[in-house]
């Protein structure tokens, strides 16, 4: 039976006035009854564009949803894990509105798409709470020589997906992580109210049970080189998935003032050290999902009185997940659209405000993008003692020698399908190749790399 309601089954959530006082997960997850009701909204259409057009790893979406309608949640999980390594993560942080749900037939003609992300999260959480022990002793089918070793650099989503698939294929895998914690952007970049650390830890524990070896505090270019991994340490192949965590700065006068911080640094301190600065008036410059994470963390600073997003374009051009923006506004965040930063105002070396100017939008260019254009004589100052730069990040591959990187942004140059770099035996994928993208996009690269590594080592 199909549930023909045009509305999604609402997921229980913390009240805005409660949640902006804590870092507990905002969305509380479906009950089994709610999950079945929402799963029944799936039309099981023949072409399933949610899977073929919308999902970077081509999850078997209609199939896992059908299992939910039958109440077989464990089998739904097994269907998901045929193609994805991190369903509990992706169900929470993937931009479904652009991907699977954005292609859902139910989302056309004024209706709401099936809540695929919420259903993926439900299935993964149900498995973790009810059936995780059943997975521990499963033997992986392998065509690989188990004596061959593969090094994985970084421990973000691309690396975790690659390592998981290689372990399933029977290879010995060592993850080298330059920080002292695992998970990459999943751990230091995404707040707990969106992605609890327990969820990431659970995924990593699964790799540990499969036998992955982990080396923390080991940065390529400092503690070891690619040559040493291949020639000295006996690794047969290397996957580089070290992300793109180097901040891009505003490049305006006064940005060296105390109180001006990069969003990546602000989020890392909040997520890893539970350290929040004392500030009353906070500005976040940027309009993407990192800006949403930063502004929602800022709204939870006990001393915060006003939190404002400054964005150069209008709401229509804002790249952030609309759901995240809605929740931020519910939590008290204000947004100043068509506002461009000009300079940091400082007193005694400390930020006291952001000088801005109003912007208008040009006619669309060939790509359809409208550029912000300053409005003459429109400058004004927004008071601020904490200014968070959330305008993007780039890769830092300066320590990686022996493979080709792009001259302008330092991204590793690799084949988009096989993830092969310019050097035989070295593969790369995720944000370090493409620049900042989604978790599921990085995972897809990691899975493609694992397949290519297996083919390379099986020759």
Image (spheres, rainbow, N blue to C red):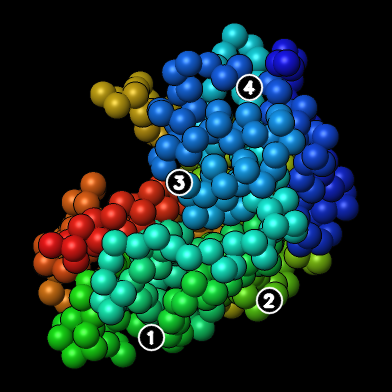
* Residues at discs 2 and 4 in contact (Cβ within 8 Å): no
> Extreme top residue here?
109
Precedes in sequence: disc 2 or disc 4: 4
- Residue under pointer 4: 42
- Residue at 75% x, 57% y: name it: 130
**Which of 9 and 26 lies nearest the eye of the viewer?**
9
Precedes in sequence: disc 3 or disc 2: 3
- Residue under pointer 1: 218
Precedes in sequence: disc 4 or disc 3: 4
In space, the residues marked 4 and 1 are separated at their CA atoms by 46 Å
Q: Position of residue 318 (x, y in %)?
A: 52, 36
In space, the residues marked 4 and 3 are separated at their CA atoms by 20 Å
In space, the residues marked 2 and 4 are separated at their CA atoms by 43 Å
Q: Is residue 283 above or below residue 148?
A: above
Q: Position of residue 383 (x, y in %)?
A: 66, 56
Precedes in sequence: disc 4 or disc 1: 4
- Residue under pointer 2: 275
Q: Is residue 47 above or below residue 216?
A: above
- Residue under pointer 3: 83
- The 10 Å Cα crowd at callout 1, few under 14, some 14 to 19, many 20 or more, is some
As helix, strand or loop, the secondary structure at mark 1 comes to: loop
- Residue at 18% x, 63% y: name it: 458
Q: Nearer the viewer, mark 2 or mark 4?
A: 4
As helix, strand or loop, the secondary structure at mark 2 comes to: loop
């Amino acid at each position: 039976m199909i549930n023909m309601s045009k509305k999604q089954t609402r997921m229980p959530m913390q009240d805005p006035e409660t949640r902006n006082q804590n870092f507990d997960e905002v969305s509380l997850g479906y009950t089994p009854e709610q999950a079945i009701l929402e799963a029944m909204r799936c039309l099981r259409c023949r072409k399933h564009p949610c899977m073929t057009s919308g999902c970077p790893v081509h999850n078997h979406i209609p199939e896992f949803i059908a299992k939910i309608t039958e109440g077989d949640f464990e089998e739904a999980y097994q269907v998901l894990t045929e193609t994805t390594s991190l369903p509990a993560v992706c169900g929470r942080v993937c931009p479904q509105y652009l991907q699977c749900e954005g292609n859902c037939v139910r989302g056309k003609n004024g209706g709401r798409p099936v809540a695929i992300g919420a259903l993926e999260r439900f299935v993964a959480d149900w498995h973790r709470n009810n059936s995780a022990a059943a997975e521990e002793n499963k033997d992986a089918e392998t065509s690989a020589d188990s004596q061959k070793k593969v090094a994985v650099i970084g421990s973000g989503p691309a690396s975790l997906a690659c390592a998981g698939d290689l372990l399933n294929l029977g290879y010995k895998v060592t993850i080298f992580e330059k920080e002292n914690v695992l998970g990459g952007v999943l751990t230091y970049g995404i707040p707990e109210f969106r992605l609890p650390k327990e969820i990431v830890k659970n995924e990593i524990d699964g790799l540990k049970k499969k036998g992955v070896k982990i080396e923390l505090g080991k940065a390529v270019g400092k503690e070891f080189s690619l040559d040493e991994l291949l020639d000295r340490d006996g690794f047969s192949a290397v996957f580089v998935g070290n992300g793109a965590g180097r901040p891009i700065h505003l490049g305006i006068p006064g940005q060296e003032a105390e109180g001006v911080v990069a969003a990546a640094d602000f989020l890392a301190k909040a997520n890893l050290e539970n350290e929040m600065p004392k500030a009353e008036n906070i500005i976040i410059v940027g309009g993407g999902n990192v800006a949403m994470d930063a502004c929602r963390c800022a709204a939870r600073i006990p001393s915060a009185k006003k939190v404002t997003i400054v964005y150069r374009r209008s709401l229509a051009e804002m790249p952030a997940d609309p759901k995240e923006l809605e929740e931020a506004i519910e939590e008290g965040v204000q947004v100043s659209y068509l506002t461009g930063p000009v300079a940091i105002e400082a007193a005694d070396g400390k930020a006291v405000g952001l000088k801005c100017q109003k912007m208008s939008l040009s006619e669309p260019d060939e790509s359809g993008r409208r550029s912000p254009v300053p409005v003459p004589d429109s400058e004004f100052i927004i008071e601020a003692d904490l200014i968070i730069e959330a305008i993007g990040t780039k890769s830092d591959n300066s320590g990686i020698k022996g493979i080709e990187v792009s001259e302008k942004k330092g991204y590793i140059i690799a084949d988009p399908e096989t993830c092969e770099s310019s050097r035989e035996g070295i593969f790369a994928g995720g944000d370090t190749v493409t620049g900042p993208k989604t978790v599921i996009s990085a995972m897809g690269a990691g899975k493609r790399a694992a397949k290519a590594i297996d083919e390379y080592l099986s020759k």
